Structures are given as structure tokens and as C-alpha cells.
């Protein structure tokens, strides 16, 4: 193994010719080795990879992402392994953060958790992110697990960095792939461990198989062994299934059940606010959006974080609710609070114009000076 802070970038790829060059160009000069494991490309993926590394290997795809990633890690020769997907990039600001992070790595660090930015609004602001185990000590003690939504369970000294990886897809992946893999495992009689069971439920939900998804989420929660953040998200997804089935009161109960596991998250408070908006129960909706504003982000918990839920969205929705109640001074004030989070948001600009028109109309009425 080479020096203590050396990093092998280990990637699994297949038919990624439209994005792989972009990814490698953003990171090739930051790492000490690039390992590419190809799982069956039929396009120019390997040729693009060859411009950046000679260490390109073939791996026969067996419907198991963990097996492929472990094969890539097994080829690494540096002190640490880092993974990226082909449609990931390190932006300019994050490249410098990465350099600073790498300079501080040493024998005492086992896992580096980094933000993964995966959702964006029309202005390019990050709307959805979560921490992932991104850089792992290459000592053979940690490996990938899970045929789908594979992960490494961090152990030893774990540190959190602020160098984000940005996920920019140019084309959709096979929407049925993950569900097909899960169904294949179950057909072979394999039991899904809690994390895989949670993600199986999500895949069923994405395919609008609400009753089956709900049963999986309820079994996952009843089992009790799942990770806390997955339990909270299972409550949210159980609610979504119930809304899809037209069972609004049970959906409300599923959201409230999340409070049995931990303090409220702003995402769930916003879900509750939306529930009452749909009921036109404006005061109750305001209450829950206010609770969202009280919540603090817990990015380091590793759970999914919807940034808009921590400020912008609750303020904008409270603005709507106060408008429905005819309390437009308060509504306009909350629109300005929303503007503090997203100054250039079209919705904020629209609301400003709306409230200005109302004010002008009121001032022009007979008897007003």
C-alpha cells in the first residue's frame, strides 16, 4: 500500500459513455489511482475510461451491486477506496474541499462521510441530499452489502466532511431494474434484511403497488431492527401508500406514528401541513408548518434531507394559508421570510406582485387616502 492518505477511485460502470468522461475529468487529478470495473458495456465506455486509467476490469453482472463494488474495491492498491457513480461529479468548490480533506487523512480515519446532492430546483439550488460513506479505509474489514441500494456499515473512526458529490443524471436508469432484482431474490427464497426490506417497499411504492408496499413497510416497522432514519422514512412512505389508496385518516396516523421513534423532522411536519391544506383546515396547516420551522436539520444523522422543508417551503405554505384566511399582512410577511431562503424564486416574485396588487386596489377604493 502507498502513503497514508492515498486514494483509489473505484467505479462500476455499464454503458456510460455520455457521462463517464465528465465524472472522471472532475476527479482524476485528485486521486492516486482509478479502478474501473465494467459490467458489460456495449458502447464506448471502456474507451473513455482508458483515457484516464489502464486499470479497467470486466465483471460478469449477477444482479448484485454489492458484489460488483466489492470486486472494484478488491483491485484497489491505495490506503483508501472511494466510490463514485458515472453520473456523479465534483464541482469546482468541492474539488478544493476534497484537496483539503485528503491532506488531513491519516491512519486514524476509517470512514469519511460526505454529502450526496441528488435533487435540485430550477435555479440549481440543492433540494435533496444525504450523507454517504464515500471514502473507506482499504484494510479488508468493511465490505459492501445488499444486491440493491448497497451500502457499507461504517465502523471505527468516522468523520464527516463538507465536500459534496453532485449527482447529475443525463438519462433515466431502467425503472424496473431494482424491483426486478428484489423479486428475483425473493423468488429464490432469500430473506431480505431490514435495510433491503425498506428499499423493497420503496420500489413497490414507485411502481404504484400501494397495498404490497404498505404491507412491506408495516412489516419493516413491526420487526423493529431497522435503522432509525429508515423507520421515519417508512412512516412517510406508508402514508403515501395510504393516500394512494384513498385512506386519508390512516395516512395521517402513519405520519403521526413517526413521532414514536424520534423528535419531529421538518419533512414530516410539512407532510402534515400539506394534509391539512388539502382538507382546507388552514389553522391546523399553519400549526404544522410552524413546527417545521422549529426543526433543526440533522444532516449528520445520515437520513434523507429535503432542504426546502427547513425554511422556504413552510414559509411559503404559511403565506398561502394566511391568504386563505384573509390575513394578507401576515401572508405577505411570510412570503418575505420565504424570500430569505430563495430570493430569486418565481413563486416569491408572483406572491409579491399579488400582494402589491391587493394593496393598490385597497388604496384606490373610495374613501381611502
Image (spheres, grey):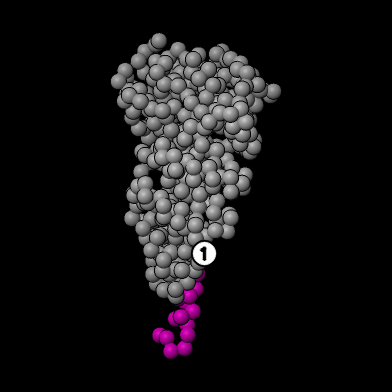
Q: Is residue 206 visible?
A: no
Which residue lies at the image location 36% right of the left edge and 38% below the top edge?
Answer: 300
Give whichever of 63, 83 is nearer the camera: 63
Instruction: Verify whether residue 61 appears in magenta.
Output: no
Name the residue tied to disc 1.
278
Q: Position of residue 211 (x, y in %)?
A: 58, 48
Quarter of the picture containing the N terminus is top left
Whether 72 is drawn above or below 331: the answer is above
Which residue lies at the image location 39% right of the left edge and 31% below the top edge?
Answer: 113
Judging from the image, what secondary structure is the residue with disc 1 in?
A: helix
* Residue 190: quadrant of the picture: top right
Give whichever of 183, 153 is nearer the camera: 183
Point out the stretch of residues depicted in magenta: 349-369
**Left or right of 156 in this view: 204:** right
Which residue lies at the image location 61% right of the left edge and 34% below the top edge?
Answer: 183
Instruction: Verify whether residue 353 appears in magenta.
Output: yes
Amino acid at each position: 500500500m502507498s502513503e497514508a492518505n492515498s486514494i483509489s477511485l473505484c467505479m462500476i460502470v455499464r454503458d456510460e459513455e455520455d457521462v463517464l468522461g465528465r465524472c472522471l475529468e472532475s476527479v482524476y487529478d485528485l486521486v492516486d489511482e482509478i479502478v474501473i470495473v465494467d459490467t458489460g458495456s456495449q458502447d464506448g465506455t471502456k474507451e473513455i475510461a482508458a483515457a484516464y486509467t489502464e486499470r479497467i476490469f470486466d465483471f460478469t453482472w449477477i444482479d448484485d451491486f454489492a458484489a460488483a463494488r466489492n470486486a472494484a474495491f478488491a483491485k484497489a492498491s491505495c490506503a483508501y477506496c472511494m466510490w463514485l457513480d458515472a453520473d456523479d461529479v465534483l464541482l469546482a468548490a468541492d474539488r478544493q474541499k476534497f484537496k483539503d480533506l485528503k491532506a488531513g487523512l491519516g491512519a486514524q480515519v476509517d470512514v469519511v462521510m460526505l454529502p450526496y446532492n441528488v435533487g435540485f430546483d430550477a435555479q440549481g439550488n440543492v433540494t435533496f441530499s444525504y450523507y454517504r460513506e464515500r471514502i473507506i479505509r482499504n484494510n479488508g474489514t468493511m465490505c459492501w452489502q445488499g444486491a440493491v441500494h448497497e451500502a457499507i456499515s461504517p465502523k471505527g473512526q468516522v468523520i464527516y466532511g463538507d465536500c459534496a458529490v453532485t449527482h447529475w443524471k443525463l438519462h433515466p436508469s431502467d425503472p424496473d431494474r431494482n424491483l426486478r432484482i428484489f423479486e428475483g431474490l425473493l423468488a429464490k427464497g432469500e430473506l431480505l434484511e431490514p435495510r433491503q426490506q425498506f428499499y423493497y417497499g420503496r420500489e413497490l411504492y414507485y411502481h404504484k403497488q400501494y397495498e404490497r408496499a404498505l404491507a412491506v413497510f408495516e412489516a419493516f416497522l413491526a420487526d423493529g431492527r431497522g435503522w432509525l432514519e429508515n423507520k421515519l422514512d417508512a412512516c412517510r412512505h406508508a402514508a403515501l401508500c395510504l393516500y394512494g389508496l384513498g385512506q386519508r385518516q390512516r395516512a395521517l396516523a402513519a405520519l403521526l406514528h413517526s413521532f414514536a421513534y424520534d423528535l419531529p423532522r421538518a419533512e414530516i411536519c410539512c407532510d402534515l401541513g400539506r394534509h391539512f391544506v388539502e382538507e382546507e383546515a388552514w389553522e391546523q396547516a399553519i400549526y404544522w408548518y410552524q413546527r417545521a420551522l422549529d426543526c433543526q436539520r440533522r444532516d449528520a444523522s445520515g437520513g434523507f434531507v429535503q432542504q426546502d422543508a427547513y425554511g422556504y417551503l413552510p414559509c411559503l405554505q404559511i403565506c398561502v394559508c394566511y391568504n386563505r384566511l384573509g390575513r394578507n399582512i401576515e401572508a405577505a410577511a411570510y412570503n418575505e421570510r420565504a424570500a430569505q431562503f430563495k430570493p430569486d424564486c418565481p413563486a416569491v416574485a408572483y406572491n409579491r406582485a399579488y400582494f402589491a396588487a391587493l394593496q393598490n386596489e385597497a388604496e384606490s377604493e373610495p374613501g381611502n387616502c
